[in-house]
Image (cartoon, rainbow, N blue to C red):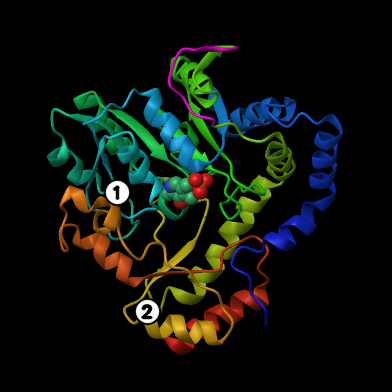
């Protein structure tokens, strides 16, 4: 049996007509940079998320950078965040010469542990940046309450969680600014790099739109030092085609997760989704003690797996200058040794799910 981790080819074949039509129309118009499709997509994203401003951009990484620049992060400012994430979260903080302050995670959701935030706050703390890992939002009410008490901003790295909810609000509609990624394998992916920044604050939105085009506020007038951070019109065309089916895809992702959990929860630790939240299921991540042997036997059966993430950021070489040591953040470190993600996408058949769970059961 052939099993694909993200099934991007089946995805394209499924939406081919609409995607081809949109791309061809953009080729015919040759409106490659900030064409009307980008505006239409931003409006559709606003409708979907119920956020006042959606600003598309060149990647999830650049979306984080734009969000940090919008709240005016300066050298030396401290941003409290999780080490159990993709590099971009800490990297963009450090790129602005600010300091990522890594605190440990909850052992069940793998998200930032809000109980550890207050202890990490100093005079230099500017913001808290939770990551909605694997697609599930963090405990935003608790995080927002602390942010309000200490007058801090909340920026949500929702690169994996587009379409998820917390108390019925979309993840994009939480915090001061929320971001997402349209990297092909993310829940809503384009066919290249792409991302978006979401905010209900019009001042931030105006600044982000300017920062995205080199800080221009009118042609050849540069108010800020910005970046070249636009989303290509062709990618907007792909996303517009895919957004139409995205609600259905989310339902199917949830079904796949449910089937996995039904088959696997008796034999190992399956994902925990808190009652007031829904996940966009960017990945379905299990926890095992004997990970290496399981990885090997799944590979032999042709089942692709992934590890998100094998090294927490505080132990990455590029962050050595922050002087974290092994065992500083034990829950993240333990998770990085035990997590394993199995194929998750809306195009998995019941036979494939059965084959995957059977093989896990046999090799655990
Ligand atoms: C994917 C991802 C990013 C970066 O998104 P890109 O579009 O690849 O730049 C940032 N943060 C997290 C948590 C991610 O998973």
User: How far across and how far down the image is residue 245, in percent?
Assistant: 71, 46
Residue 37: say if magenta.
Answer: no
Q: Which residue is mark 1?
A: 82
User: How far across and how far down the image is residue 293, in percent?
Assistant: 40, 86
Q: Which residue is mark 2?
A: 291
**Residue situated in front as seen by the camera: 358 or 290:** 290
Q: Is residue 170 visible?
A: no
User: How far across and how far down the image is residue 253, in percent?
Assistant: 59, 58
Q: Is residue 272 visible?
A: yes
Q: Which quadrant of the rendered structure holds the C terminus?
A: bottom left
Task: Please report whichever mark, 1 or 2, sits nearer to the chain's N-terminal start.
Answer: 1
Is 78 positioned to the left or the right of 20 in the image? left
Rendered image quadrant of residue 273: bottom left
First to last magenta residue range: 219-228
Q: Judging from the image, what secondary structure is the residue with disc 2 in?
A: helix
**Residue situated in front as seen by the camera: 290 or 144:** 290
Residue 69, disc: none
At x 30%, y 40%, the residue is 94
Q: Which quadrant of the rendered structure holds the N terminus?
A: bottom right
At x 75%, y 56%, the residue is 12
The CA distance from mark 1 to mark 2 is 23 Å
Q: Is residue 290 above or below residue 88?
A: below
Q: Badge 2: how crowded within 10 Å, few (<14), some, or many (20+)?
A: some
User: How far across and how far down the image is residue 53, in percent?
Assistant: 54, 23
């Amino acid at each position: 049996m052939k099993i694909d981790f993200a099934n991007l080819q089946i995805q394209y074949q499924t939406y081919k007509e609409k995607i081809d039509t949109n791309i061809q129309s953009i080729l015919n118009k040759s409106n490659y940079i900030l064409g009307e499709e980008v505006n239409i997509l931003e409006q559709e994203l606003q409708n979907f998320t119920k956020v006042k401003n959606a600003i598309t951009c060149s990647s999830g990484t650049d979306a984080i950078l734009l969000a940090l620049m919008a709240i005016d992060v300066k050298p030396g400012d401290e941003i409290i965040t999780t080490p159990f994430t993709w590099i971009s979260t800490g990297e963009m903080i450090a790129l602005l010469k600010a300091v990522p302050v890594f605190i440990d995670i909850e052992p069940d959701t793998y998200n930032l542990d809000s109980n550890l935030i207050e202890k990490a706050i100093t005079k230099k703390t500017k913001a808290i940046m939770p990551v909605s890992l694997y697609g599930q939002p963090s405990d935003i009410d608790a995080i927002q309450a602390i942010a309000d008490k200490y007058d801090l901003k909340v920026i949500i790295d929702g690169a994996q969680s587009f379409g998820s909810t917390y108390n019925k609000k979309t993840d994009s509609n939480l915090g001061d600014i929320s971001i997402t990624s349209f990297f092909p394998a993310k829940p809503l992916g384009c066919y290249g790099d792409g991302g978006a920044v979401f905010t209900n604050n019009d001042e931030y939105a105006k600044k982000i739109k300017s920062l995205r085009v080199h800080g221009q506020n009118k042609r050849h007038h540069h108010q800020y030092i910005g970046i070249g951070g636009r989303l290509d019109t062709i990618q907007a065309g792909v996303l517009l085609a895919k957004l139409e089916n995205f609600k259905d895809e989310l339902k199917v992702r949830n079904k796949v997760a449910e089937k996995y959990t039904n088959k696997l929860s008796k034999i190992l630790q399956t994902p925990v989704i808190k009652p007031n939240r829904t996940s966009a299921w960017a990945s379905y991540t299990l926890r095992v003690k004997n990970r290496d042997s399981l990885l090997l036997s799944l590979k032999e059966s042709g089942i692709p797996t992934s590890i998100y993430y094998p090294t927490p950021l505080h132990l990455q070489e590029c962050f050595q200058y922050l002087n974290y040591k092994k065992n500083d953040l034990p829950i993240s470190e333990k998770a990085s040794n035990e997590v394993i993600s199995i194929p998750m996408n809306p195009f998995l058949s019941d036979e494939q799910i059965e084959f995957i769970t059977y093989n896990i059961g046999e090799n655990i």
